[in-house]
Image (tube, helix red, strand yellow):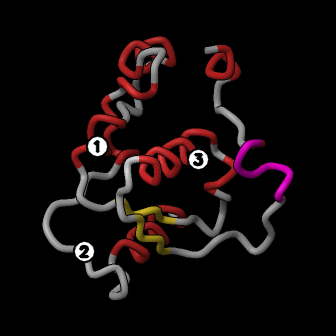
Amino acid sequence: AGGFKAFAQAVLAPDLQLQGGLWICFFANPQTWSPDELSALLGVNPFMSPFYTALEKAHNVVAIRNPNRNMYARLWCVFELWAAFSIEKPIKVSGSNPESISLAETGYNAICTSEADTLV
């Protein structure tokens, strides 16, 4: 719950000045689905995934850092930020990073939750 509380506080931060609707990608994942069902939803090409489609339609992108986990060590998060940057979406960042971040696990060295995701 601490991670979600930090997320909510970061979303409500006055410096973000969010207006209108907000699509939260981790709420879009069917959390109870099996890995096979989720893979079928996402497909093999991340540029054809529902997440990328939503990203293309967004006016802004908000990246919420988590004090418990370095988001730049998660391959999907790195992909989403790179994709947003590539299609020139304004990116706002809020929330705290962990106290210690290993550069050896960041960016190009980010990992997938499922080893099968690295085989595509």
Q: Contact, CB < 8 Å: mark 3 with mark 1?
A: no
Q: In the picture provided, is 16 more to the left or to the right than 83?
A: left
Residue under the image location 65 percent in, 24 percent down:
114
Give the residue at x 30% y 62%. 60
Q: Secondary structure at mark 3?
A: helix
Q: Nearer the viewer, residue 23 or 33?
A: 23
Residue shown at 61%/15% (left/top)?
120
Residue on which the image places disc 1? 56
**Mark 2 falls on what kind of element?**
loop
Which dot marks residue 18? 2
97 in magenta: no
Mark 1 vs mark 2: which is more N-terminal? 2
Query: Closer to the N terminus: mark 3 or mark 1?
Result: 1
Range covered by the magenta-colored residues: 103-108
Structural distance between the alpha carbons of marks 3 and 2: 22 Å
Which image quarter: residue 38?
Answer: top left
Q: Please name which of the two marks, 1 or 2, marks the residue nearer to the observer.
A: 1
- At label 2, the amino acid type is Leu
Q: Residues within 10 Å of mark 3 (few under 14, many from 20)?
A: some
Q: Secondary structure at mark 1?
A: helix
Residue for badge 3:
78
